Image (cartoon, grey):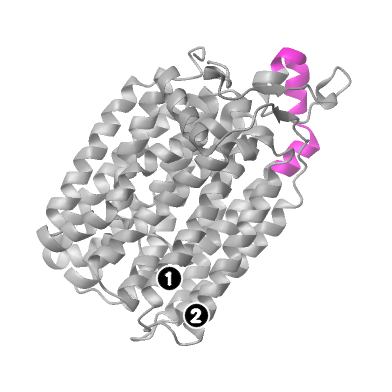
Amino acid sequence: MLPLEAGNLSTYTRRMPSSLSASSDATDPASASLAAKLIDAPTAEAAATDPVDRRNFAILALYQIVMRTGWIFKTESIIMPAVVDYISGAGWIRGCLPMLNRFGHSIPPVLLARQVKLLPRKKWAVFTTTTLMSALFLGLTWLFFAGFAHSMWMPAAFLVIYALFFMCIGINQLAFTTVQGKLVETTKRGRLLLVSSIIGAVSAVLFAFVLLPLWLQGDTPRFDLIFGFSGVLFAGSALSVLFLVEEADDFQQDAASNPMHYFVDTYQTLRDDRNFRLLAFVGTLFGMSFMLFPHYQSLGLRTMNLELKSLMWWVVVQNIGTGLFSIPVGWIADRKGNRLVLQIGMLGIVAGPALAILMLHAGELGTRLYHFVFVLVGLTPVVLKTLYNYTLEISDAEDHPRYLSTLSLCSALPMFLSPLVGYFVDLFGFEAVFLAIATLVLIGWLLTFGLQEPRHHAKK
């Protein structure tokens, strides 16, 4: 792995915290690449059972569980596109959602990766961004409650809030994954994924099953209540972060950087690490699947003439799918590695749009079984987390923000074509667009077989 200061664009120095000295209790197992040089392996193994580590594991799981419960009420493949259809209905506007989504996931993390790295305690970035997410959704709640849903300016206002929300999400995901890499050791991250996904899915499904039928009745859905509930739960997630025990880092930046340097860092990361470069390409092809998210519900509601209450079942089924897939995925990731999980998950992502088109042409049977499409859509967050966990394994701890932000940028590149995809859906129909994107994701699946398994290879 080349040092971060490659190219002499900026220089970082790392001073060893006193907590990593010989007298330390070493309660930071995720910084293994550094700690392994400073403490004996038996000491590191004992530290992994420390009460502080168990507490941090539980809090990180709780954060994701509460977040997941709120997230089900704004599902990107179901609820949010339905909101756009309710206030507008234009395919190209619906197609803007993935573009704004992935823009927020990619550009802000690249611009702020160094700032996140330099924060002594990354949990404050997680707390701040989650709080802002809550505030934005509570603001959206007010707009719908005040009766502005069908105002001429509402689509534009909705898209602006949506874009700001996902800018917060992008930085939040970068900071949270960095905290996870710092506080949770490699062979426990699959367990964290399993615990948070299973319990989060059960909680989300129960709340959705009880509340969404009340809020999606008739022709006037209560989107104000839906968004308000999400906003409150996001606030709860933010508060949980305050209880993390995170040792302060002492990274320092010697030279000032201008914004172009951030993108040069991204280029150098891709240029200098062949294995990560291939992973980034896999991430780009996987990112193609996000462009279909707004159109699954449109295919069901508008083309197959399913009822609005079907949204509740699709949300429930999608989250059940995520939870069920997380059971074997967490086990396989910890024991066999993240590459195998990525290969299995990508194949499921390929099957999603193909199954949707099959259901479209299956008549009454397809209408009854269309909700099974969302079981496969539920694989998406599992695959995304696997990509991040694989990235944590192939990069050193101090380089995690840079690698994660680069991966986010690469996986988001296809999203800038998303409005065009929405236009093509209106022009050519669902079949051509869905199958074309499934083919591109299939190519990404084939490329995963060229990735190294980091637990069997030395990092380069």
| Mark 2 crowd level (few <14, some 14–19, many ≥20, 10 Å Cα) | some
Q: Amino acid at mark 1?
A: Phe
**Which secondary structure, mark 1?**
helix
Q: Quadrant of residue 280?
A: top left
**x and y, in percent, of residue 224 in the image:** 49, 79
State the image coordinates of residue 370 (x, y, percent, origin top left).
24, 62
What residue type is disc 2 on? Answer: Leu
Nearer the observer, 115 or 395: 115
Residue 455 drawn above or below residue 371: above
Lower position in the chain sequence, tag 1 or tag 2 = 2
Q: Which numbered circle lies on residue 39?
A: none
Q: Is residue 383 in view?
A: yes
Q: Position of residue 78 (x, y in %)?
A: 36, 64
For the residue pair 100 and 257, the one nearer the viewer reads as 257
Q: Are marks 1 and 2 in contact (CB under 8 Å)?
A: yes
Bounds of the magenta segment: 36-56
Which residue is denoted by mark 2 in the rendering? 143
Res 162 quadrant in image: bottom left
User: In the image shown, does 255 or 82 lie closer to the viewer?
Assistant: 255
**12 magenta-colored:** no
Q: Residue furthest right?
A: 23
Give the residue at x 38% y 22%: 451
Q: Main secondary structure of the magenta part?
A: helix
Mark 1 to mark 2 CA distance (whole Å) = 9 Å
Within 10 Å of disc 1 (Cα), the crowding (few <14, some 14-19, many 20+) is some
Disc 2 element:
helix
In the image: residue 424, left or right of residue 220? left
Residue at 11% across, 65% down: 363
Q: Which residue is under mark 1? A: 158
